[in-house]
Amino acid sequence: MRERQKRLKAIKRIIREERIDNQESLLRRLETEGFHVTQATLSRDLKLLKVGKQAVGNDGYFYSLPSEEIRREQERNFAIDFARGYVSLDFTGAFAVIRTLNGHADSVAIAIDNLNIEAVMGTVAGDDTVFVALREDISRESFLNTLRDRVPEFDD
């Protein structure tokens, strides 16, 4: 399992089991488990996991994970956004190049970023084109299969 995946799994477990109220506490807690990350990396991890803050009366807030139902609904909405703007897909080197309808590249890139596709390192969106940087060890077919799985309407 990749280091990032191990860290994300640890973050989810810690948030489920403990009352964590700020990033500094979570950073310290992760360090006790051998994960040394920056605050910026932790921020990205929390965003990726869609961690929110939940109020506890007058006692402040603590981190919480979205319910499975909410997570599935969010993922479904991102899949719809992808399908709505998608036109075509091609590959060059370590990049997938997605053509979109005019003005839809942003929403398609955001969808890809939020569908948590392990093969994707990141996206860059223009007006009608999205460049998707793929990890070196990922095959094109693997990326396509994951897209087909996450976006049922995807037709390459």
Image (tube, rainbow, N blue to C red):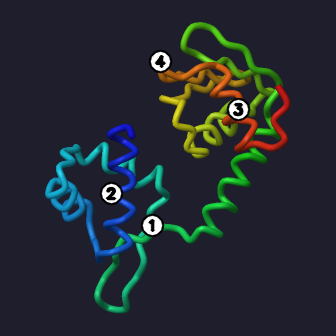
Across and down, in percent, residue 27 comes to 21, 56
* Disc 3: CA contacts within 10 A as few (<14), some (14-19) or many (>=20): few
Q: Residue at x 33, y 57 (%)?
A: 10
Q: Residue furthest bottom?
A: 57
Q: Residue furthest front?
A: 1
Q: Say which amino acid is labelled 3.
A: Asn
Q: Say which amino acid is labelled 2.
A: Ala
Q: Is 85 left, or right, of 22 in this rendering?
A: right
Find the distance from the CA under tag 3 to the CA under tag 1.
30 Å
> 109 or 26: which is nearer to us?
26
Find the distance from the CA under tag 4 to the CA under tag 2.
25 Å
Q: Name which of mark 4 and mark 2 comes first in the sequence.
A: 2
Tag 1's secondary structure?
Answer: strand
Q: Is 63 left, or right, of 69 in this rendering?
A: left
Tag 2's secondary structure?
Answer: helix
Tag 4's secondary structure?
Answer: loop
Q: Name which of mark 1 and mark 4 comes first in the sequence.
A: 1
Q: Say which amino acid is labelled 4.
A: Glu
Q: Residue 53 lies in what quarter of the image?
A: bottom left
Can you identify the residue that label 4 sits on? 136
Find the distance from the CA under tag 2 to the CA under tag 1.
16 Å
Can you identify the residue that label 2 sits on? 10
> 37 or 40: which is nearer to us?
37
Find the distance from the CA under tag 3 to the CA under tag 2.
27 Å
On residue 145, the disc is 3
Across and down, in percent, residue 91 comes to 67, 12
Q: Is 119 left, or right, of 45 in this rendering?
A: right
Q: Name which of mark 2 and mark 1 comes first in the sequence.
A: 2
For discs 2 and 1, the disc positioned in front in the rendered view: 2
Rendered view: 65 above or below 138: below
Rendered view: 3 above or below 128: below
